[in-house]
Image (cartoon, rainbow, N blue to C red):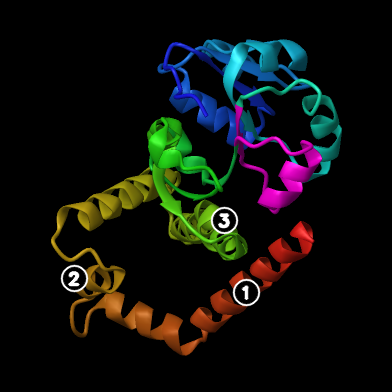
């Protein structure tokens, strides 16, 4: 497989939430082409150009698949007769590596990957699986712009998707609860403050020698203080068990979608 040339074009098939966030991060690095039934002005404003799928394939060296799982057969039927040596990076949840290879009639240059919406800032964990020797080409150069890449076994993808891929929703769920409680206590627009808390907490984790989550909790929850009282209540009410059951249900759902 040839090395990726930073002067070459990258294509996106699908420009929904995930695709748009990746486009946002890569727009300053590469010329971008997009194929999607609906043109999004935000994507156009980033400098990406919408085009037909055959033109996108012909002009792109890397093609990101950022479509919903129910669209893969339709798209693969178009792609399989157009591909030559392009690198396909699939962000499609639940779609197994060999299934995609079969749908593309044996196309060899494929990476299965799963990020979070944090790719727009380059701060997403990205799980990858492939049978390519990607250490010998520049595929990781592109993915590393979007986040921190981690090679995992394919059977770990369902857990990765349900824990890390869904992570922004889980953290936003807690943040939304904090926002609602704050409003009940008279704070009219608490969301900007909560975003500051998230950013500040992230900074603490990155800046101290020991960056374990338990260390931060102990740092904030002084003995006999209000934080400790709240955490004790949360723990005794069985919230941890609820989260474990919820995420395990999500893992089972992910596995079902991939079967």
Q: Dot 2: few (<14), some (14–19), or many (≥20) neighbours within 10 Å?
A: few
Residue behind mark 1: 248
Q: Left or right: 169 with respect to 217?
A: right
Magenta highlight on residue 95: yes
Q: Position of residue 210 (x, y in %)?
A: 17, 66
Residue behind mark 2: 219
Chain-order first, disc 1 or disc 3: 3
Q: Which residues are magenta?
A: 87-109
Q: CA distance from mark 3 to mark 2?
A: 27 Å
Label pair 1/2, CB-CB below 8 angstroms: no
User: Who's the residue at 55% across and 47% down the image?
Assistant: 130
Does the image show residue 40?
no
Q: CA distance from mark 1 to mark 2?
A: 30 Å
Does the image show residue 113?
yes
User: Who's the residue at 68% across and 72% down the image?
Assistant: 249
Residue 234 tag number: none
User: Who's the residue at 81% across and 23% down the image?
Assistant: 81
In this rendering, the label closer to the viewer, 3 or 2: 3
| 227 up-or-down from 9: above or below | below
User: Who's the residue at 21% across and 55% down the image?
Assistant: 204
Chain-order first, disc 3 or disc 2: 3
Judging from the image, what secondary structure is the residue with disc 1 in? Answer: helix
Residue that sits furthest to the bottom in the current view: 236
Residue behind mark 3: 166
Q: Position of residue 214 (x, y in %)?
A: 28, 74
Q: Position of residue 199 (x, y in %)?
A: 31, 47
């Amino acid at each position: 497989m040839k090395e990726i040339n930073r002067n070459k074009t990258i294509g996106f098939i699908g420009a929904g939430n995930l695709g748009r966030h990746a486009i946002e991060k890569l727009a300053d690095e590469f010329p971008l082409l997009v194929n999607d039934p609906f043109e999004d002005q935000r994507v156009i404003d980033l400098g990406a150009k919408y085009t037909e799928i055959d033109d996108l394939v012909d002009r792109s060296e890397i093609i990101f698949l950022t479509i919903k799982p129910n669209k893969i057969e339709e798209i693969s039927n178009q792609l399989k007769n157009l591909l030559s040596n392009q690198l396909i990076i699939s962000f499609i949840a639940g779609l197994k590596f060999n299934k995609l290879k079969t749908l593309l009639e044996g196309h060899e240059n494929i990476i299965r990957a799963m990020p979070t919406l944090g790719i727009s800032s380059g701060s997403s964990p990205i799980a990858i699986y492939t049978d390519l020797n990607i250490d010998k080409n520049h595929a990781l150069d592109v993915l590393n712009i979007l986040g921190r890449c981690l090679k995992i076994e394919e059977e770990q993808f369902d857990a990765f998707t349900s824990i890390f891929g869904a992570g922004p929703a889980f953290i936003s769920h807690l943040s939304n609860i904090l926002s609602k409680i704050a409003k009940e206590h008279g704070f009219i627009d608490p969301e900007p403050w909560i975003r500051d808390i998230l950013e500040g907490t992230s900074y603490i984790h990155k800046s101290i020698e020991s960056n374990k989550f338990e260390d931060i909790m102990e740092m904030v929850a002084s003995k006999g203080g209000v934080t400790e009282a709240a955490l004790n209540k949360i723990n005794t009410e069985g919230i941890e068990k609820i989260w474990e059951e919820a995420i395990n249900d999500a893992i089972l759902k992910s596995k079902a979608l991939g079967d």
